[in-house]
Amino acid sequence: MWQQLLGQIQNGDRKALARCISFIENEQQGYQDLLVELPSNVQSKIIGITGPPGAGKSTLVDGLISELIKDQKKVAVLCVDPSSPFNLGAVLGDRIRMSQWYTHPDVFIRSLATRGSMGGLHPKIIEITDLLKAAGFDYIIVETVGVGQSEIEIAGLADTTAVVVVPEAGDEVQTMKAGLMEIADVFVVNKSDRPDADRFVKNLRLMLAPAFSSNKNEIQVIKTVANQNKGIDLLYEAIKKHQLETGFNDRKLWLLTDKVYHLIQKEKMRAVDKTELKNKVRNGINSGSFNLYKLAKGYFA
Amino acid sequence: MWQQLLGQIQNGDRKALARCISFIENEQQGYQDLLVELPSNVQSKIIGITGPPGAGKSTLVDGLISELIKDQKKVAVLCVDPSSPFNLGAVLGDRIRMSQWYTHPDVFIRSLATRGSMGGLHPKIIEITDLLKAAGFDYIIVETVGVGQSEIEIAGLADTTAVVVVPEAGDEVQTMKAGLMEIADVFVVNKSDRPDADRFVKNLRLMLAPAFSSNKNEIQVIKTVANQNKGIDLLYEAIKKHQLETGFNDRKLWLLTDKVYHLIQKEKMRAVDKTELKNKVRNGINSGSFNLYKLAKGYFA
């Protein structure tokens, strides 16, 4: 069944793909069998787009899809929404913005709720991007708000991470969240038609200069006005340039090692039920004969 | 060997006890075999003493030891020091304060460094208190600075948790750390000869009244001036009163369940080496044939 589904997905069946993502999200029986079958030598590249709320990430992604389609690429977009109910309005607005692409044969868009995963992007983000790679997309764009743990995860997941910021009047680059500074391969200064934009960009470039930062590679700073479709072509060029220049990503190595470790741990602990354990502890205490290590040892087999 | 050591400990050999705590701390070969042998139906009670730095916890513990010795009890004290180097001076001062007890046959004092355990008291705190129980102490006092995760842990570990605070001039009870509020079985207002102490105590009692809080049991508020040995007798009475009144501790159940769960997890993951895993991930990526689930599956056996 899974091999048939995988075949459909590789033949471009989008309904099969959407269904399969849901299977993985819901950990439906046998989803691991499918994941074991995924081909691994695929050339897809992941582009991470992150930054603070209101920076115009979705409009930028919308423009980036245009560029990729013009370049005859197939593109999948994963929008990782923080599941806070307060963001719902904004998120819906974003999705409507991208809606022109929903029916395009070379574009696939999917929203993922974070579902309380401990500050990360999504508990199955690696599995889902692996599936999209197998589905033959040239580029996978992962768009997310840059908060907490998700920054570290996107930097490991993406081949190129673009951090989107806006020049705020009077805002100093120094106040920018340090985490975003560290993960950027490309900086996008969006809404760069605002006053003070040039000063902001100048300060940012100064701060990213090798003398001031620990970056080995040059970090490009791109000015865009996404809602006027300005500068998106330059962003695409910058992304391609970065991908040609860089080799192995150490953050990716750690992310994947951690993931494998947790998969193994989850499997090994499958038979250990916490409620049952709690009852055994309660009974032990009540009967006055509780020994922590004796109880644990019973599960060591 | 372990049974012999356990016998020595139960016969009151303090050097054997001290050595055994170090064995457990260092996870020396076979330490688990000793822990499996510990008798479980012992009547020792754990008293948790926590609160902000500078509240006078060590002086209070010093006084409490006096009360317990007067009452012909055997007492062990664990001082859990946050391992921050900035606290070293204070910590040494505290230990010197208690030093009169170091040679007393019915008193055992031990400092434990937290060693970067993730916000908790100490990675082996449960094991060490179990050992002290087996050694025949009537009371085990665990003294710690109330920060972060350690509050939750001490509330689960201790049969009675005393939170020590001081009345600061102009300080309002409302600003007290919420976590400390929730775990207190007894509140100690130390340095209560300060001006405004009565107002502070009055506000605290008001706040702890059943109408304002979710506490089932009455939370006693005890005024002390530890360095003049005032009120310590009342604190000891309050602790004994609490221990007579309360039965099963739900927080203890969770703490122990969690502990057993992690013991099992640690054992099951013993064979999985993260460095080896990382190398396999690296080789997989480099050879262009990396599959997350295939790698994980190899460890499932």
Image (tube, coloured by chain):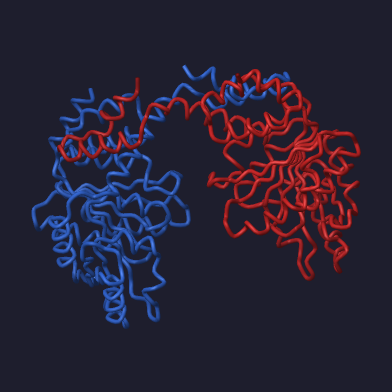
Chain colours: A red, B blue
Give A91 or A258, whichever is nearer the viewer: A91
Is residue A266 at all visible to an observer of this figure? yes
Query: In which quadrant of the rendered image does the N terminus of chain A lie?
Result: top right
> Could you tell whether A280 is left or right of B285 in the image?
left
**In-image side of B92 versus B245 (left or right):** right
Q: Which image quarter: residue B206? A: bottom left
Number of labels in the image equals 0
Relative to A19, A98 lies left or right:
right
**Where residue B102 sits in the image (x, y, percent)?**
22, 50
Q: Residue at x 30, y 57 (%)?
A: B96
> Which residue lies at the image location 37% right of the left edge and 44% below the top edge?
B122
Q: Quadrant of the C terminus of chain A?
A: top left
Q: Is residue B103 visible?
A: no
> Can you say whether A186 is above or below B70 in the image?
above
Residue A88 vs residue A259, the one in the foreground: A88
Answer above or below: position of A243 versus A208.
above
Picture coordinates of residue A202, whole percent (x, y): 86, 60
Residue B257, x across and y down, in percent = 32, 39
Residue B91: where, in percent of width, then height? 37, 56
Q: Is residue A286 above or below residue A221?
A: above
Nearer the observer, B159 or A56: A56
Q: What residue lies at 25% left-to-right and 61% top-to-bottom?
A: B185
